[in-house]
Amino acid sequence: MRDQNWLFAYGSLMWDPGFEVAERIVATVEGFHRSFCLRSIEYRGTIDSPGLVLGLDATEGASCKGVAMRVRDDDWPQVIAEVRARELLTDAYREEVLPLLLDDGREVNAITYVMRRDHWQYAGGLCADEQARIIAGAEGGRGPNRDYLYNTASHLAELGLTDPDMEALAAQVRRLCG
């Protein structure tokens, strides 16, 4: 197994990778937090009505728990090409190789997608009420923005990764949607 066959997922890649995963394990990356900071204009919104999806946002002293996924060597070229096409659609993310601490104690380097704060789609710093309003109303090529939030919150809970902010946001969006 080659170390570069690892991907770190913190949003929809956790529950909808779109490829076969050889190994999946909870992992932590330091110096970043998961945040609804990316205006989605394709998958969960449109140019006229952007949605919000998660970005890995650089934050000193923060850490983010997500899922490390190892891909088999034979599958790697096709998988990474497909993931790049999906994640780098508008260049709002930059691809980085970051060190991860796996829950079993191993350390690996993994490719992940980090939010570019200098990109026009960056929406960091929105209050929870504004995030909820946007997520409740947006829809894009992959469906309603709220489904992205609900699926991510549900998957994090299944993994035992409590995220009170995301759970509160999901509850607020449910209220707005009736």
Image (cartoon, helix red, strand yellow):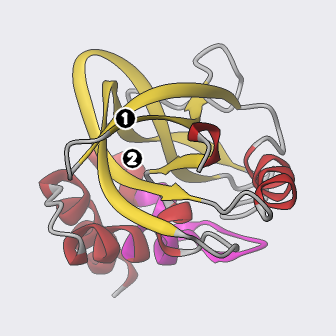
Q: Is residue 134 magenta?
A: yes
Decide whether residue 1 is among the magenta residues: no
Q: Dividing the image into 4 quarters, which one contains the C terminus?
A: bottom left
The residue beneath circle 2 is 130
Q: Is residue 81 left or right of residue 67?
A: right
Q: Main secondary structure of the magenta part?
A: helix
Residue on which disc 1 sits = 100
Q: From the viewer's perspective, tell me whether residue 177 is left or right of residue 75.
A: left
Residue 67, percent across and down? 39, 56
Q: Nearer the viewer, residue 95 or 26?
A: 26
The secondary element bearing badge 2 is classed as helix
Identity of the residue drawn at 42% across and 58% down: 133
Mark 2 burial class by Cα count in 10 Å: few <14, some 14-19, many 20+: few
Q: Mark 1: which secondary structure?
A: strand
The answer to which quarter of the image holds residue 28 is: top left
Residue 17 percent coordinates (x, y): 61, 69
Front-lying residue, 9 or 153: 9
Badge 1 density bin: few <14, some 14–19, many ≥20, Cα 10 Å = many
How many numbered marks does the figure carry?
2
